[in-house]
Every structure is written in structure tokens, then in C-alpha cells.
Image (spheres, rainbow, N blue to C red):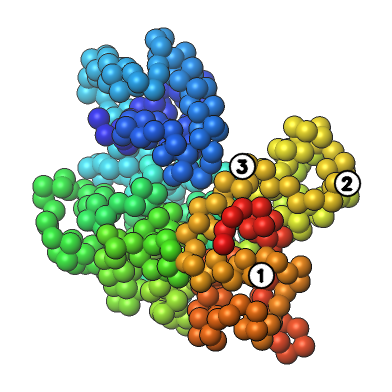
Amino acid sequence: MDVKELLKLADNLVLAKTGEHLDDLQEAILAGVWEGQKYSQIAEASYCSEGHVRNIASKLWKRLSNVLGEEVTQSNLRSTIERQQVFIVSQNFGNDFVFCNVNVSTDSQPPEVPKDRSPSTPTSDTSQPQTRLDLTDAPHISSLCDRTSELATLEKWIVQEKCNLAAISGLSGIGKTALSLHLIQKIQHNFEYVIWRSLRHSPPLETTLKNLLEFLLNKPEIELPRSIPDRLSLLMEYLRKNRCLIILDDVQTILSSGQLAGNYRPECENYSILFRQIGETTHNSCLILNSWEPPREITALKGENLPVRSLQLKGIGTAAAEIFRQKKLLNPETWENLINAYEGNPLWLKIVATTIQEIFRGRVAEFLKYDMLFLGEELAATLHPQINRLSELEKNLICRLSREANSVSIEQLLQDADLSPSELFNGLQSLGRRSLVEIEEQENKTLFGVCPVVRQYVISNPVC
């Protein structure tokens, strides 16, 4: 049993017993423990604290124990699940509802995708082309605070203007994944195939190509070409002949730390060939990349009238009030102040809203009385991997900018930062691509600063 089969089996068992799906962190814990990872490794990959992972894992083992009717622990997970698999196979011989990839089928009709596991099901309107969906890698679809403009822009690019490649970038928690899932719901009927793959574990290009081709061609690995160039050639041929929508999530994991934005990890360098071929050649498909920062090819190839486009997500503004309503916060007249303080980042606002609910019983006005920007362990944990991957040049600059209450000009930075103009421009450009600096115009000057949350993190943590 591989990790995908494990997660599918566990989710089906929990759903049948409780009516609820496993969440992303629970799935990450299951996958990590299955592959022999320690809680500290899972915590680092999931951008949260080890203590939080241990707490969720403890609850997960109890939940699985109740579902399976026997004790499940970190140490006996594999043996317990494998026994359960054998039992189900013996009881349901010939029934593939648990173990088969529901999205890969030799039937002429598209596979059924459960409504609560994907953005939508294939349309039943026979006037529309049938769509084969493979969303097994996709997280659960969540509510989307007002992104009407961004959805319209992406739909225009992909459906009307038929762009080849669209990159969606922004800080962790800003809503890239949620936006892509809701986009699928709107445009999937324009495609014959829709496939979602996460690069969370930095798979080599060979593995990603294998996964894509196995679904698109419905062929086992043994029938696929062995070399990467041949697999790339086969994929491009299929993208030319068919209308395919491919979403690659967590693209930042194949990009390098300690360098300027957009550079690849050495073992993932050949992804640049894939992105460049899809962006530069003529075909009938589209690739969407979700990432903290765009790969370097995007910045070189993108353009308003070109087949490569880039969308950098910002905060959601007053639409974030819906988050506070869901959290049952009080004092709505103060909500806009809270939204502005946390830059409208949905994840940051959910974290701080939970804190206000737990400590102040939902009273936002009481929280704001302390006139402080509270990060907390969870919010800091979301920023840590993004700040930690900066180059030394970027760390130097972000520390310099964080010492200023107001935005500063390039002239001021050149005087104080001990950098050449070339170094300064490279550093600011890279931080901008990572969504870590804010740029404003004032009296014909360009000013640079960092948002309050990032400033507070940098001041509170030894970055430089």
C-alpha cells in the first residue's frame, strides 16, 4: 500500500464512521508516520510547531482507534492499516470503491467524484464535453472570501484568451489553493481533463511526469518512456491534442532556499524545462502554478498579451469580515482595524480570530485595547519557513526595512544598507516577488516597506 492508498482508505473509513473527512494536517501526519518521519519533520513540512503536531496526532490515533475498533498508535499504524485492508478486500472482493483511484477509469464515462471531496462533479449536460477529473491530491474545498475579481481575471486568461501557463503567487495563507479550487468549479467544463498535483514533498520531475501521464494516457508506468525528454515529449503531444488543465500546488518546495526568488533546488532544476516548454510552445492546454514565489521562467515569459500570465494575490480587505462572523466575534465596528492590522491575509485572520475567541470570548475591542500586534506561535510558524528561505542579501534588507516605522526610498537604503545599486535592486525585486515588501508612490518617488506582521516577526526573531 502506498501513501495515496493509505490516505484514501483512512479518509473513507473515518468518513463512513463520523461523516467527516480528515483535514490537511491529519493527512500530513498519516503520510509522514507511514514514511517513517518524526513529528519534528512533519511539523517543519507542515509549517507548524512540533507540539501542535503531537497534539493533533494524539487525537488522530484516538479517532482511528474508535473507527477500527482496536488501538492505533504511531508505532503500529502500518500493521493495523494493512490488516484492515486485507479484511476489506476479503469482504468486498471485486469492489474497488476504496482502493482504486476513482479518477482513473477505463470506462467511457467520466468517474464519479464525491461532491464533498472536489469542487464539483462533471456536468450531466450532454451538450458539454465530459471531463475526467483527478483531484485526489487536492485538499478539501473551503469557503472563499470575496475573490470575484481574481476569479474573473483567471477565467478570462485561461478560457477566453487560452493562455498556456498561469502562476498564482503570494504569502502562505493568502488563498492561492482555495482560489484554484473554486476556479476549477467555474471552468472545468471547458476541459477534457483536469488534474491536480501537489509538489509538497518536492518530487523529482520524472515522478511528476509519470503521475501526469499515467492519468492522461491511462497507462501503467511500465508502458511509459523511461527518459525525461521522451516523457516530456509525450506530455506535450497530449497537451496539443487535448484540452487539459493541470494545477501544480506548493511549487515553492522545488525552489531553492538561500538564493534570490525563483531559483530551483539543484535536484529540481529540470522543472524549468517543463515550465518553459508549456509556456513557449503552441498547445490547447493550461498549467496553473501555485507558489509563494514565481519560478524564474514566469518573470521572463509573462506579459499582458503573451501566453504566460502571473497573478500576485493580496489581502481580501473588508470581505474578511465573513471570517469573523464564522468565528462569532463581537464588536463588528472594530473589525476593519483588525483586518488592516493583519493585511487581510485569511490565514492570519483565522489564527488571530481564534485567539480572540479563546482569550477574550470574542471581544475584538478588548483585544485591540492592548495596541499590540500579536503573532503567537501559530502565526509565527507560518512566516518562519518563508523568512528562513531568504538569501543573506534579502535578510539584510528586510531587517533594515523592519527598523523603519514608515516606508523608505532607494536613496535612503543606499545610504544606510552599505549595498551597491545592483545589489539593492536585486534584493528589492526578489523580496517583491516573494510578497514580502510593500511598494508605494509618493511625490514621484518609489518607497519600500514591510507590512506590520512581517516587521513584528523580524523584530521578534533573530533573522539577521
Quadrant assignment, res 244: bottom left
Residue at 54% x, 27% y is: 55
| Amino acid found under the numbered disc labelled 2 | Lys
Residue 347 marker: none
Direction top: furthest residue: 69
Horizontal side of 296 relative to 393 (left or right) equals left
Query: What is the quadrant of the N terminus in the image?
Result: top left
Residue at mark 1? 401
Direction bottom: furthest residue: 444
Q: Which of marks 3 and 1 is in front?
A: 1
User: Which structural element holds mark 2?
Assistant: loop
User: Which structural element holds mark 3?
Assistant: helix
Mark 3–mark 1 Cα distance, whole angstroms, equals 24 Å
426 is higher (above) or lower (below) than 150: below
Percent of width and height locating residue 445: 71, 87
Residue at mark 2? 369
Residue at mark 3? 378
Query: How many numbered marks are there?
Result: 3
Tag 3: Cα neighbours inside 10 Å, few (<14), some, or many (≥20)? some
Quadrant assignment, res 424: bottom right
Residue at 61% x, 48% y is: 380
Would residue 130 be visible to someone looking at this image? no
* Label located before the other in sequence (3 or 2): 2
Horizontal side of 264 relative to 27 (left or right) equals left
Mark 3–mark 2 Cα distance, whole angstroms, equals 22 Å
Mark 2–mark 1 Cα distance, whole angstroms, equals 27 Å
Residue at 69% x, 47% y is: 375
| Amino acid found under the numbered disc labelled 1 | Leu
302 is higher (above) or lower (below) than 378: below
* Label located before the other in sequence (3 or 1): 3
| Amino acid found under the numbered disc labelled 3 | Glu
